[in-house]
Amino acid sequence: MKIVSHYLQSIDGIAIYPIITLIIFLSMFIAITIWAMKISKKNIQDMKQIPFDDGLIKDENPNY
């Protein structure tokens, strides 16, 4: 990140806060992208059905 920081600091009028904000944004974007690529297909199918559920809790294991 020194290369990015050095390049951005060479711009007139730029402060440290925009650099920190950019680093936080990029790290969160990369983390969420990696999470989205690693999520299982079953989990995606379950999330797709959430809007169509009638609000009742499904009991996956009724024999407890």
Image (tube, grey):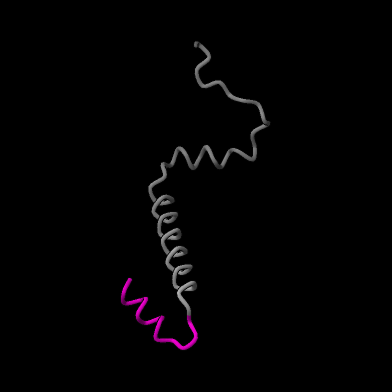
- Span of residues in magenta: 1-14
Q: Residue 2 location in percent, x, y?
A: 31, 74
Q: Residue at x 49, y 42 (%)?
A: 44
Q: Residue furthest left?
A: 2
Q: Residue 64 location in percent, x, y?
A: 49, 11
Q: Residue 52 location in percent, x, y?
A: 65, 37
Q: Residue 10 location in percent, x, y?
A: 39, 86
Q: Residue at x 41, y 55 (%)?
A: 31
Q: Is residue 44 left or right of residue 5?
A: right
Q: Is residue 59 left or right of residue 32?
A: right
Q: Residue furthest top?
A: 63
Q: Residue at x 40, y 82 (%)?
A: 9
**Where 55 falls versus 28 (above or below)?**
above
Q: Residue furthest bottom?
A: 12
Q: Residue furthest right?
A: 54
Q: Is residue 24 left or right of residue 2?
A: right
Give the total of numbered labels. Answer: 0
Q: Residue at x 54, y 40 (%)?
A: 47
Q: Work out whether residue 42 or residue 14 is closer to the camera in this orientation and state it.
A: 14
**Where 58 falls versus 47 (above or below)?**
above
Q: Work out whether residue 52 or residue 36 is closer to the camera in this orientation and state it.
A: 36
**Where 63 falls versus 32 (above or below)?**
above
Report if residue 32 lies within the magenta region.
no
Q: Work out whether residue 20 or residue 29 is closer to the camera in this orientation and state it.
A: 20
Q: Quadrant of the N terminus?
A: bottom left
Q: Work out whether residue 52 or residue 3 is closer to the camera in this orientation and state it.
A: 3
Q: Is residue 54 left or right of residue 2?
A: right
**Where 34 falls versus 61 (above or below)?**
below
**Image quadrant in which you'd find residue 33:** bottom left
